[in-house]
Image: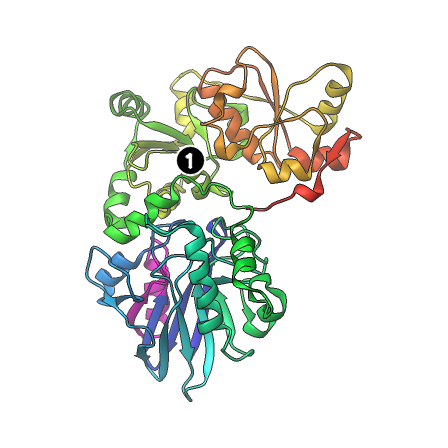
Amino acid sequence: MKVEQIYTGCLAEAAYYIESDGEAVIIDPLREVEPYIERAEADNAKIKYVLETHFHADFVSGHLDLAKRTGATIVFGPTAQPNYEAHIAADGEELKVGKLTIKVLHTPGHTMESSTFLLKDENGKDYAIFTGDTLFLGDVGRPDLAIKTNLTREDLALHLFDSLRNKIMPLADDVIVYPGHGAGSACGKKMAAETVGTLGAQKQLNYALRADMGREEFVKEVTTGLVDPPQYFPKNAVMNKMGYDSIDTVREKGLRALSVRAFKAAWEGEGALVLDTRLQDHFAQSFIPGSVFIGIDDSFAPWVGALVSDLTVPILFVCEPGRELEVVDRLARVGYDNPIGYLEGGFDAWVAAGEETDSIREITAQEFEKIYNDQQTNILDVRRQSEHDAQHIVGAQNFPLDFINRNMSEVDRHNEYYLHCVGGYRSMIAASILRSRGFENLINIRSGFRALQEETKLPMTEYVEQLTEL
């Protein structure tokens, strides 16, 4: 028996590979399916099932392409109604994989079709549960991300309470818990950094599994502190339910190398969005006027999803040569299936062609400290409200990047603004968006709040009691 977690940090998402006696199962695969196929081929195994714990909201699953390329059967739990061929398993149904057994446990609450897969070993002993977004380490799934339903989030929370207590908590303490996400995912509020644990530990440490917790208290706990999910979540959930284009089709469109002339023509003719995915420092020094920075080396896909409201918008991109496929695949992970090409030769080609460039000024924490002490400053803290409320520079205006499109009217284009986040990545994204909307007087604080805390004596205000993590 082999059980492997395949974890993707930028989405804080865990897929799983299970193999026994030449047969394999993939649980909750990402959009690009080659790694799963190659893993099974390395074991000389055939992928028999693709198990989906629910209709995911935070990424587009690879189940359709994986099933098409391997002949595997897609499996959902009870009540799922996908718009394509799949096996809808009954509650308690058992699937055979080599010498192993996988039992389907219907665990509604995060969504109504949510299911947990209980793996039994060769001797029939309960070995592990693959909980999707029903149970995380330290938390449980949000009850407000289901595809449009007549149920309220309080109704779903009650379903989740029953699922946990009737299906999961009765299992033995030594059962391994393999969740669908770890810390950093917006599918829960306060997940642990670890991505593998035991059910016994969760019964002791997870607030939602307290034996003495009543239904009303549970509902209050899991619904308090929820903020609006990223705008792409419901759109991805619909794609996972209704179907989508093959990743091969998306790649064929997106991996078109465009000369500077063709790039400019496509930009104008298609009304495209231009994404610059290079390193933050490189973008700050010089970039194509009107382009938006979202660097590939950080949480690229979630920030595209949070900030680009139209999943169908044509996207042109600038990247470091050799990373074109990575950009297209990571866009597709969150449902952006309309990249239409990239700048051949990268940004250097733009410069070599003599085209106009722009830049954004950056300063160090020490430089900002001197400016702050010498004159009145307008500071935009683009961190989440919870981060700002925990601790911030006195006088800073909270301007969360998550909601920049909604809150644009809060900033005056005639003022000069100093922007910061934790490390400089989010604030550079914000600066690029503001610049593309006509804001000229922007200075990014390099290394962000971390450096401002450690390297300066700036006055800080704390409201730790208000801290609420997404």
Res 320 visible: no
Instruction: Tell me residue 274's x, y (percent).
Output: 37, 28
Location of residue 117 in the rendering, given as x and y in whole percent from the top left corner: 39, 71
The quadrant holding residue 289 is: top left
Q: Quadrant of the N terminus?
A: bottom left
Q: Nearer the viewer, residue 212 or 263?
A: 212
Q: Is residue 36 magenta?
A: yes
- Residue displayed at 24% across by 65% down: 70
Q: Is residue 363 left or right of residue 403?
A: right
Magenta span contains residue 43: yes
Indicate the quadrant where residue 334 lies: top left
**Residue at the extreme bottom of the image, as rendered:** 123
Give the image location of residue 426, x and y in percent: 55, 34
Viewer-closest of 8 and 239: 239
Side of 187 where 80 appears, left or right: left
User: Is 20 positioned to the left or the right of 368 in the image?
Assistant: left
Which colour style is shown? rainbow
Q: Residue at x 51, y 77 (%)?
A: 175
The correct choice, above or below, for 207 with respect to 456 in the image is: below
The kind of residue tagged 1 is: Cys
Residue at 31% of width from left, 74% of height from top? 45
Label 1 sits on residue:
319
* Disc 1 packing (10 Å; few <14; some 14–19; many ≥20): many
Q: Nearer the viewer, residue 396 or 168?
A: 168
**Quarter residue 18 falls in:** bottom left
Classify 190 as above or below 96: above
Q: Where residue 19 sits: x, y (%)?
A: 37, 75
Specify start and end residues of the magenta stretch as a single range: 27-54
| Residue placed furthest toward the right | 457
